[in-house]
Amino acid sequence: MRNRPPGTRRSLSAWIFACLLLAAAVASAQEYQQALPGYQFQFPRDDFNHENYQTEWWYYTGNLRAPDGHRFGFELTFFRQGVSRAPGSDPWYVHDVWMAHLALSDIGAGRFHHQERLNRAGPGLAGVDAATGTIWNGNWQATITPRQEDLRGIGRNFAFSLKLLPAKPPVIQGQNGVSQKAAGLGHASHYYSRTRLLTSGSIEVAGRSYQVEGTSWMDHEFFTGSMAPNESGWDWLSVQFDDGAELMLYRMRRKDGSIDPYSSGSYVDAQGRSRFLSARDFVMTPAGDTWTSPATKAAYPLRWHVSVPLLHLAFEVTTPLRAQEMTGRFGPSYWEGAIDIAGTHDGSPTHGVGYLEMTGYAEPGRAVVPR
Amino acid sequence: MSGLVLFYRLILRPLFRQPGRALLILFAIALGDAAVVAIALAGNAAAGSFHSSIETLAGKNDFEVTAAGGVPQDLVARLSKLPYPLQVSPRIEDRAMVADTRQSVPLIGIDMIGAANTANLPVLGASEVSDAIRHINDPDAIWVTRGLAQAIGDRLPLLIEDHTRTYTVRGILPDSTQVSGDAVVMDIGAAQIATGKQGRVDRILIRTPAEGGFAAWESRLREVLPAGVMLNAQGAETAANRRMLAAFRWNLRILSYIALIVGAFLIYSALSVSVVRRRPEIGTIRALGTSRNAVLLAFLAEAAAFGMLGSLLALPLGRALATGAVRMLSTTVNALYVSSRPGPLSLTAGSVVLALVVGVAVSCLSALAPAREASLVPPTEAMARGRRDYEVRVERKRDALAALGLALCGAVAAQAPEIGGKPILGYLSALLFVASAALLTPLVVHFAMEAGSGSLRRLAGMEGLLASRSLGGSLRRTSVLVAALATAVAMMTSVGIMVGSFRETVLTWMQTELPADLYLRPASWAGGDQHPTISPQIADRIARVPGVAAVRRMRAYDIQYQGLPATLAAVQANPPTVPENLRFLSTAQDADPMRQLPSGNFAVVSEPFANKHHVKTGMSLALPLGVQKVTFRVLGVFYDYGDEAGLILVDWNILQRYLPNPAPSNLAVYLAPGANLAETRVAIQKAIGNNNVLAFSNREIRRQGMRVFDQTFAITWALEAISILVAVGGIAGSLVSIIIDRRREFGVLRFLGATGAQIRRLILFEAGLIGLLASAVGLGLGVVLSLVLVFVINKQSFGWTIQFHWPVAVLAWSMGIVYVATILAGLYPARLAVRMNPIEVIHEE
Amino acid sequence: MSSAQTDPDAAPPLLVFRDVVKEYRNEGERVRALDGVSLDVPAGRFLAVVGRSGCGKSTLLHLAGALDFPSSGAVLLENESTHKLSETGLTKLRREKVGFVFQSFQLLHTLTVVENVEVPLLLAGEINARPRAMERLTLVGLADLAQRRPHQLSGGQMQRVAIARALVHGPRLLLADEPTGNLDTATGNSILALLRAICSERGVTILMATHSAEAAAIADAIVRMRDGRILEGTQ
């Protein structure tokens, strides 16, 4: 059982796009390349588009704070789903469908704002441009340069503009260049993370403008394929400890209630050294405090107990804002929000912030993209 | 209580005794009012609907971006990347023709994926989006309204531009699509391919957040748009079309009021007669102590009641008339203005109010003078036995002076410029001339009868003498009848002269305008504002056909100039052997503008365009072309009767620089000397191949043009017919009441040895005299009005120079019809008079 | 059986009523206007018919003027029974033999005085009516007013015009229905004198209906009527 599932949170999109793939077969997976072991990451090349893989995303989350203590969480995600590889220069021809999610958790005001967006590349409506380092969907965009990443998100009633400075080099998730998702060659993804991005910028919401600072997390993953049929959802979290270390864990839930052995994670110490954690290495259990979404009636556990005996690490996960459910028109609804961490590490108290994602609790909504 | 008694004695009792009079008044009100209602309804249905077909699936947006020749599509991206929370929706807007039924429907291309983001587009839910994505790259996938397909998967052959292709229905649009009528929706990519508009979109709709204000958003958006691109509030194009249609509808509405004016004359006449007849009753009532105002009010109340009742009758009648009118109207709207399909006819609260207000107002106004006269009846009148006959109180001098004054005012008003694009003063002038003629009518009748009674007596003996004398004798009444009919005749004559002159002018113009041997256009053309294109290679293929000397390409675009629609056309220079076909009103000194056109940014404009925008030779036009605003110098103004919106002509190659699109919308083919037309035509058809391009010979296109012309004016004729019908019907009614009134006279004549046949002849003769006099006055007035119509009203509202022309045959025909109609109108009254018992009528008192 | 026989030597009767009954239907009710009237009117005589209004005077005149047929019995004008005549025949009879004078003159207001007088001639299709009309106007003493309109005349003048009109075609019989009814006494008397003169000088037979005994006095004979019957003969 050395194989691991692909970056679990990213399976969210996989799930969404699975629907697309299962559908009228706009494109068959055979046209695309699979994620195979031995992949050599190269930067900045791998920061940008990999159109030979059917599914790809760039995923930013972060915890921010204004000088007056007003606290925010944010999410900005760009998804790409390949639809056709047929050659064609007509810009309206749909090779890929581009989806994006934008969310702002206004923790200080107790409000959660979110929005989704769907586009084709068209004459420049969405896409990735390596030359300028831009990944965009309409007026939501990320600009990646070796030393800095800039994010801009403009929602109907909120907006933010952030500057992200990587404090550590990218962490390649999984082993041998692939993050294996199931047994068998090619059932995997190429996946790396920037686990600590020092963030500053401005947020506009509710008629006010805030200067904010904090830390962000970025994932970039590309692959061809879908998740296992016996899985029902997952719980994923990322933590940025005050002591400079980061942790990523997820557990895959099966339809029979058991936890999939492909669940895994990674730990990055303050110096940037990462360590792979397998399902045997950690325990992650809900600890009551269920929140029921008024929109989807899904019940999400908002308190978790996590322990990683190998690292002498144990902590409680709580959230400063209960309603952080992303309800989507084009995909399933899920809870993704800012969290607080309090526990012990090597016997000393430890604190941190992070992001928690819980999927598969709500009835699958109508999928965007064909069933 | 006493009011009730008054109303009963004065109004109700006479009404029950003479139901014919009531019916006459009701008829006049109902028919006149019905014409107004019909035109209002039909106008709404025919011209009101085009709005929705353009706006199919448009949702509610704040701004729209358009450009002549289309908006470059990178602007879509530029706009959607702006750092504002905007909704940006690019669209292709064109037309498709259902190949089987030849029904022309709007073809709308929308970004099926991006449309998912537009929250204000309820029609595209997640399932529609997912359906759309499933077929997103299928260029043959269409979504249609229920009227066009039974089921998903149906195959629908559509003629778009010059090619027919079979499309597959991938979805049925729900009825809530804000479309009135049918529409075809495609993904924007497929729509671009189908319409050959790659690289450009027709319109970008933008929705801004509610906060910020229109002006602020406008300036923010304007900043990123190139100069030639137009930014307007959504529906600006629709609004511009509406403005253009407004003038047309306004003119039509005026025309419909003519029937009402004629009706007013008749109401006036009928009420006058009835007031005179009731003088003894009025006298009695006044002697009993009723005040003048009470009498006045009683008569006005009667008129109002008639107006109310007549209007209620007018509603169903108007709706029935509208059904016919709407068909004619929409033909006109399609041919001249924008592609539209008549919407449903609906009697709204507005139309009910219109009918009531118009009907009641007109009958009260017409009743005012007779009612006033009634109130002035002295109480002693009741005592005077022997009813006083009609006073012959024509104050000739005063009336002549007043008529002269009115005519002068009319002449002055005719010189004034238009107001807000509408020839308001032109119509005022026409109205003044009508009033002047109405004042002159008694004089004309008087002098004609005075002068003519001798010869009439010689010509027609007793009947002639009596008819002429009774016409001249009861001037007040007969002159109203003559004036009513004369007005109707004048309208008919003037419109007849105007349309006839126009027709002749257009015929002559087409002879010079169409020098080529064959004209080609795509089969999908279905309206004046459409410019479907021919595949560029077809023109090249035709040029190589043996027997073809030259092919001249033309490309037309609908553009907006100063907020009004106009047609911009690029033409290739004429082959040197062909004489220039355009006739110019004005040119720069150095003669030949068409030869100069290819040498730079030069344009020639049509007369309607020059008039609408006050453009003169030598001036510069800043034309929005694609993303640029380009200045062209006007080399001349030419006569054109084909395009009401106005035409700007530039050279083909010059326009290609700004709007590079090689597809022509029309081709003119010149045959080599000696080439056989029929054979060459067959060869050209072969060169066209499977594309749906129609070829018309010079003669065919001329005939087609005249057919469109005649269709356009069908509604005008229909309205004229209603006016004449109102007048003739009114004359029949008035004659009945005159006969009832003069029954003692007929009785006396019988005593004195008159036969029934003589009595009948006398009445028919009188009717004929009314017809003759009305025709004479009407013809005179009609000629004056036709001058106003041709040189003022037409010029101001449409901007065409029409060569005055006498449509003798039409005039003779219509005069003959009016004359015969009035004589026919005398038949029933004559019968009535013959059947009266002379003993009874003599001894009635 | 009442009759108005005059001496047998006189001229044969111009107009004969023989057992004349005339019934009308008035609003569903049967009204008997004449109830067995027999009367001979000799040519050249002036006969007055006297009675209250509604007694049948006017009906008598209408039957005499061939405007109507009797319900039973016969009316003979110059030995010709009106009963046998068609509508056209009746009109012809009126045109040639009968003239009417009415209480309210019944002039046509749109025509001039002389044109009014011409009407019967014109109706009969005569072209050259003017000289005869003028002659009759001269007879009634109104030649000066020939070009006036009726409304410019006095009542007496109007009745003179009416008389001229009634005589223009040279009728044998003049029927006058209350010719003085709308006139004051003096004017009335002058009209009666005119009628008397016309009868005496031109030999026109006159049948005049009147309710005034004074007017009747000028006649050669008086026929009294009541309820559709003749009461007594001449004096």
Image (cartoon, coloured by chain):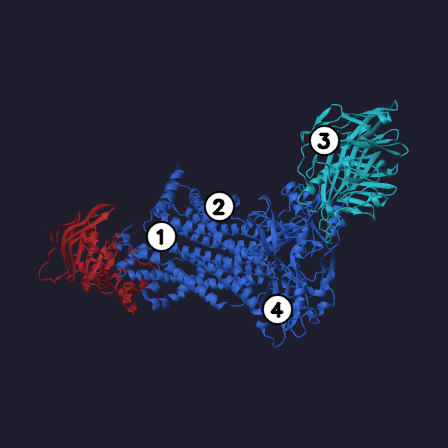
Chain colours: A cyan, B blue, C red
The label number, if any, that marks residue B356 in the structure image: 2
> Of tags 1 and 4, which is closer to the observer?
4
Q: Does label 4 or label 2 sit earlier along the sequence? A: 2
Please name the amino acid that badge 2 sits on. Answer: Leu
* Extreme-bottom residue of the structure: B674
Residue C120 drawn at (x, y percent)? 27, 63
Output the chain of dot 2. B
Residue C126 drawn at (x, y percent)? 28, 68
Q: Does label 1 or label 4 sit earlier along the sequence? A: 1
Judging from the image, what secondary structure is the residue with disc 2 in? Answer: helix
- In this figure, which residue is indicated by the disc labeled 1? B388
Q: Is residue A237 in sight in this rendering?
A: no
- In this figure, which residue is indicated by the disc labeled 4? B684
Residue B834 drawn at (x, y percent)? 30, 57
Instruction: Measure the C-alpha gap from mark 1 to mark 4.
Output: 83 Å
> Of tags 3 and 1, which is closer to the observer?
3
Please name the amino acid that badge 1 sits on. Answer: Arg
Q: How many numbered marks have been drawn onto this rendered protein structure?
A: 4
**Left or right of C196 on screen, residue B703:** right
Instruction: Measure the C-alpha gap from mark 2 to mark 1.
Output: 36 Å
Output the chain of dot 3. A
Asked if labels 2 and 1 share a chain, the reply is yes
Q: Are marks 1 and 4 in contact (CB under 8 Å)?
A: no
Asked if labels 4 and 3 share a chain, the reply is no
